[in-house]
Image (cartoon, rainbow, N blue to C red):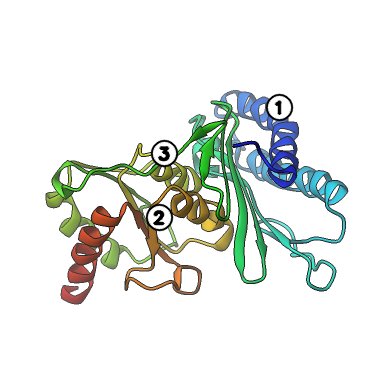
């Protein structure tokens, strides 16, 4: 499938800011040994990347709105679409010199996400999707995995950390899921976790406490790759409830039963 003009605009913006991120990532290792540490540097990189993305996208699509992780949201013209942007998903990985992070951009209009790009600067992978047009990695069509046996499934998650998340709920779910699956992974970038579900690299993914910019693009990728995405109750209130479960149809159903049972028993 040939990319639409909108996907081309988003990917071009991501690629234009990526060299700065790669350069800044290269500086992190040098800052690890300083007394101050790299935290302030990474925060600056995050904000600078977002500002550059907003500038690029505003130039290409004037009048559109923005929902931003770092800066203040910007209203667009009445009825205009809006970009939902995470300029650096996987900040902690970036901070520690781990080359697993992404730029995530979604476009929402008329109550639904219409387009999505998740770009990994270190591997030069562009995962993209448009509503009704499938999910793609460059020009390769993506499909969620075909595994039906939960015991063969590799699933990803996010772990609560300092000051964030409900550790008791997470522990209950993890203890229920681990004996049922082939493995659980925590890679630290939800947009890439969802992109990898769409690509069939992971068979499923669950996490709580995520913001719209963490998952908006990934939700469309998984659905356009033939997968299912829901909240932990099986409904469509992922953003409102800040919980997400994504997988192919059979794994989703089986993971949902495990997670729901764990929460009832917790």
x 54%, y 55%: residue = 214
> Reading the chain from its start, which is encountered first: label 3 or label 2?
2
- Left or right? Give the position of 223 relative to 121: left
- Left or right? Give the position of 172 relative to 144: left
Front tag of 3 and 2: 3
> In terms of secondary structure, where does tag 1 sit?
helix
Instruction: Return the mark for residue 232.
Output: none
Q: In this figure, which residue is indicated by the disc labeled 2?
A: 161
Front tag of 1 and 2: 1
> In terms of secondary structure, where does tag 3 sit?
loop
Q: Are marks 3 and 1 in contact (CB under 8 Å)?
A: no
> Reading the chain from its start, which is encountered first: label 3 or label 1?
1
Between the C-alphas of marks 3 and 1, the distance is 25 Å
Q: In this figure, which residue is indicated by the disc labeled 1?
A: 19
Image position, residue 122 (x, y; %): 56, 27
Image position, residue 202 (x, y; %): 33, 41
Which quadrant holds the N terminus? top right
Between the C-alphas of marks 1 and 2, the distance is 30 Å
x 69%, y 38%: residue = 11
Which quadrant holds the C terminus? bottom left
> Dot 1: few (<14), some (14–19), or many (≥20) neighbours within 10 Å?
few
Q: Are marks 3 and 2 in contact (CB under 8 Å)?
A: no
> Reading the chain from its start, which is encountered first: label 1 or label 2?
1
Q: In this figure, which residue is indicated by the disc labeled 3?
A: 199
Q: Nearer the viewer, residue 20 or 221?
A: 221
Front tag of 3 and 1: 3
Between the C-alphas of marks 3 and 2, the distance is 27 Å
């Amino acid at each position: 499938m040939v990319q639409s003009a909108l996907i081309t605009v988003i990917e071009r913006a991501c690629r234009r800011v990526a060299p700065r991120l790669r350069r800044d990532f290269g500086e992190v290792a040098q800052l690890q040994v300083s007394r101050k540490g790299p935290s302030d540097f990474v925060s600056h990189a995050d904000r600078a990347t977002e500002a550059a993305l907003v500038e690029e996208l505003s130039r290409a699509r004037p009048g559109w709105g923005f929902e931003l992780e770092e800066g203040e949201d910007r209203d667009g013209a009445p009825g205009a679409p809006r970009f939902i942007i995470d300029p650096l998903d996987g900040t902690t990985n970036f901070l520690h010199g781990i080359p697993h992070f992404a730029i995530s951009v979604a476009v929402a209009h008329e109550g639904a996400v219409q387009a999505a790009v998740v770009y990994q600067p270190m591997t030069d992978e562009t995962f993209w999707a448009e509503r009704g047009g499938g999910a793609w990695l460059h020009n390769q069509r993506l499909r969620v995995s075909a595994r039906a046996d939960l015991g063969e499934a590799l699933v990803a998650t996010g772990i609560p950390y300092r000051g964030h998340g409900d550790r008791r709920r997470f522990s209950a779910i993890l203890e229920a899921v681990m004996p049922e699956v082939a493995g659980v992974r925590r890679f630290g970038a939800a947009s890439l976790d969802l992109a990898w579900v769409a690509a069939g690299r992971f068979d499923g993914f669950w996490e709580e406490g995520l913001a719209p910019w963490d998952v908006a693009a990934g939700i469309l990728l998984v659905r356009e790759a033939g997968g299912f995405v829901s909240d932990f109750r099986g409904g469509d209130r992922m953003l409102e409830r800040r919980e997400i479960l994504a997988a192919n149809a059979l794994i989703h159903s089986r993971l949902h039963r495990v997670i729901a049972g764990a929460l009832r028993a917790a």
